[in-house]
Amino acid sequence: MNEIRFWRAVFCLLALVLILFVLVKAFTVVLPFAFGLILAYLANPLVEWFTAFGLRRDRVVLVLYLALLTLGVVLCMSLVPPLLHAANQTQAALPRYGQELDSLFSRFNSDIQKWLTPLIGAGARHFMIPAQTDDLLMKVVQKLFVNIEDLAHVGLWIIIIPFVGFFGLVQSRQWMDTLFNLTSSRYVENLLGLLAEINTTLGAYMRSVMIESLCVGFLMTLGLHFLGVNAAVLIGVTTALVNPIPFMAPVIGGALAVLLTYFQFQSLSMVLAVVVLVIVVRIIDDFILIPCVVGRSVHLHPVVMIFAVLAGVELGGFLGLIFAVPLTVVLKVVLSLLVRSRRERFLIHHEHVAT
Amino acid sequence: MKEFVCRMLKRMFRDTQSSDDLAFFRKITLFHGLHDRQLRRVLQAMQKRQYYEGETIFEEGRAGQSVFVIRSGGVELSRRASHDKAKILARPGPGQIFGEMALLDRQPRTATARVAEDGEIYLLDATALESLMRRYPDIGVDIMKNIAIVLSALLRKANEELDKGN
């Protein structure tokens, strides 16, 4: 019996290593499929809401896809022109922004040198920030677009992700049935419990983060629009997109808002107003949205979150940054279930000994 | 014309397969009082599995967290008695439930369940049910009431057996 168990464990370990090896080797191929399944997972509650009315699952998914396609086209038609306009304006103004930053740096350098010369003499001329900001900005923009192109193979992904998502939504029940039929009857209950726990925690987390991101993006856009910032939509959308990554929304969204406002108005009072807006949005997010929307779904300590994000970046780069928190949530659920199961086994063992 | 379009739409979108499931689950004590939409939501939270004769569904003493609904086939519930001999407690069949106590206390199982006849069994996990009840409290009220009815019937039966023994 023990020998059978040993060989079964060895077989499982080898299978796991093989699966991980294939996943790592074919990472770029696996990625769009994974995104498709994530899309299906996120859209599943909506499909189930409709099927509860006695509608056929495949037809509901088809109609939803058509509706989403229409919505996407409408959104593209209404959002893309202002976004492109703002992006073009920003791109056209990049050299000017660079020159302005250069002059700012040179003024700063000469001030520093003037201040240091009486103290350390001729050596003060070595204290300077060597800034070629316009070149740097252009390089950053070019590199960003090249990297995105390399990473995504955008055209292929646009086809694969909805395709996999469609089958994921239509056939998820059959896939689950197959998984449970293949699982040993002794572990069916454990597997069901584990999946239910992960689904409850992760699903709630993902949905709440999406709602929170939409709220933060909307508040930023609204505030910046009232302040008269031209790129309000661009900044709002960027903030909403980076919001699921912990601590990134105030850094990237806030910095973008401050820089673009400074370049547009050249006024410190406007920059101050934008800083106040970013702080107000953060306060609303931290004290109202996160406790009310996200906090109920998952309780991760901020230190664990920072560690997860840093580990995610180290292991998986940009994608690691995105998936760090959801994967930590899953890990937390699995660990807490393991601990609970061990404790129960310990209690049962002690009860047996006592009786 | 309007009638024709309505009929066409109904034929296109109506899920006729789930009607059989609904008719079956409506008869089960645990789901009494739930209307169609609520019952479909409960079904969405459930998982089915094909079981074969001789398979162990759960073992006495192991922690449990699901209730089982027999769609087809049969199960044998037994309990360890003295001298390691098993005492058969019940042989539930299609339309009957077992393991319902785990929904409430998640304590170790008080009996072992083995498949006596091949068939299909639906599982409802306690966590999934809790999540469903949080989202739809009206479903929770009905199911909890039904669990209380099932458990009180079991208690009544146990009392009667005790009386007979005395």
Image (cartoon, coloured by chain):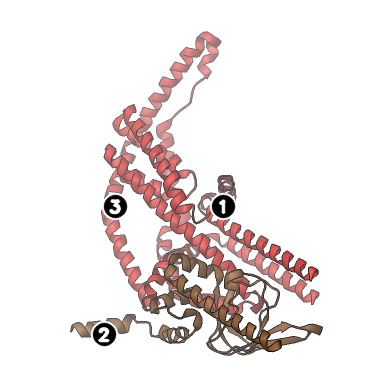
> Which is more foreground, mark 3 or mark 2?
2
The residue drawn where x is 28% and y is 37% is A227
Q: Quick one: label 1, few (<14), some, or many (20+) residues within 10 Å?
A: some
Q: Quadrant of the N terminus of chain B?
A: bottom left
What hue represents chain B? Answer: brown
Q: Chain of mark 1?
A: A
Disc 2, SS: helix
Q: Picture coordinates of residue B2 (x, y %)?
A: 19, 82
**Which picture quadrant has residue B102?**
bottom right
Disc 1, SS: helix
The numbered dot on residue B7 is 2
> Which is more foreground, mark 2 or mark 1?
2
Q: Picture coordinates of residue B154 (x, y %)?
A: 59, 82
Q: Amino acid at mark 2?
A: Arg
Q: Is residue B30 above or below residue A232?
A: below
The residue drawn where x is 23% and y is 82% is B5
Q: Is residue A108 above or below residue A326?
A: above
* In the rendered image, residues at marks 1 and 3 fall on the same chain: yes
